[in-house]
Amino acid sequence: MELKSNKELNRHFEKLKRLRKLREKEPDNTYHYWEKEIAGCEHNIVEVVEEMLKKQTPIKVIVNEAYYSCPVCGTIRSIKQKHNFCHDCGQALDWEE
Ligand SMILES: [Zn+2]
């Protein structure tokens, strides 16, 4: 199961690799342009990682009889499948009463 944030992170890392290669090829007159692009890409990576780390702290699930929903993205699942994390957004889920 690949989470949305993992996919996003991979996408950013691929872009970063491409940008670094482009910077190597044209180190002189376009150097600042690639530096700016790379900095932007790195900023996006940090944001995704911060969000992923935040999601590791469990948050109480919202239970409604036979169903429960993720407190972050609102995905609804059957109470029969009590997952420790949301399969859609990756949020860690707290089942304590
Ligand atoms: Zn979720």
Image: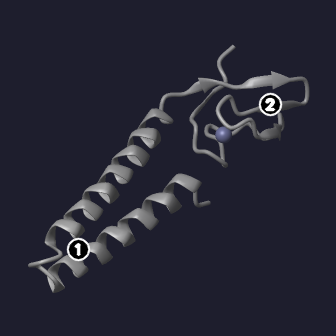
Decide which of tag 1 and tag 2 comes sooner along the chain: 1
Find disc 1 in the rendering and name its residue: 20
Q: Read off the residue under disc 2.
A: 68
The structure residue drawn at horizontal position 62% and vertical position 37%, both measured from the top left corner, is 84
- Residue 83 percent location from the top left of the image: 68, 40
The location of residue 88, given as percent across then percent down, is: 67, 48
Q: Quadrant of residue 77?
A: top right
Mark 1 lies on a secondary structure that is: helix
How far apart marks 1 and 2 lie (CA) works out to 44 Å
Q: Position of residue 30 (x, y in %)?
A: 18, 75
- Residue type at mark 2? Tyr
Which residue lies most toward the left here?
28
Q: Give the residue furthest to the top.
A: 97
Q: Is residue 35 above or below residue 42?
A: below
Q: Is residue 41 left or right of residue 70?
A: left
- In the rendered structure, are the residues bearing label 1 and label 2 in contact, judged by CB atoms less than 8 Å apart? no
Outermost residue on the right side: it is: 66
Q: Nearer the viewer, residue 59 or 14?
A: 14
Q: Position of residue 76 (x, y in %)?
A: 81, 38
The one of 28 and 55 positioned closer to us in this rendering: 28
- Left or right of residue 74, residue 80 in this image: right
Q: Secondary structure at mark 2?
A: strand
- Quadrant of the drawing holding the C terminus: top right
For the N terminus, which image quadrant?
Answer: bottom right
Kindly identify the residue that appears in the image at 80 percent across and 31 percent down.
Answer: 68
34 relative position to 83: left or right: left
Q: Report the residue at 15% width, 81% height from top.
A: 24
Callout 1 amino acid: Arg
Ligand 1 closer than 8 Å to label 1 CB: no
Q: Which mark is residue 96?
A: none
* Front label number (1 vs 2): 1
Q: Quadrant of residue 91?
A: top right
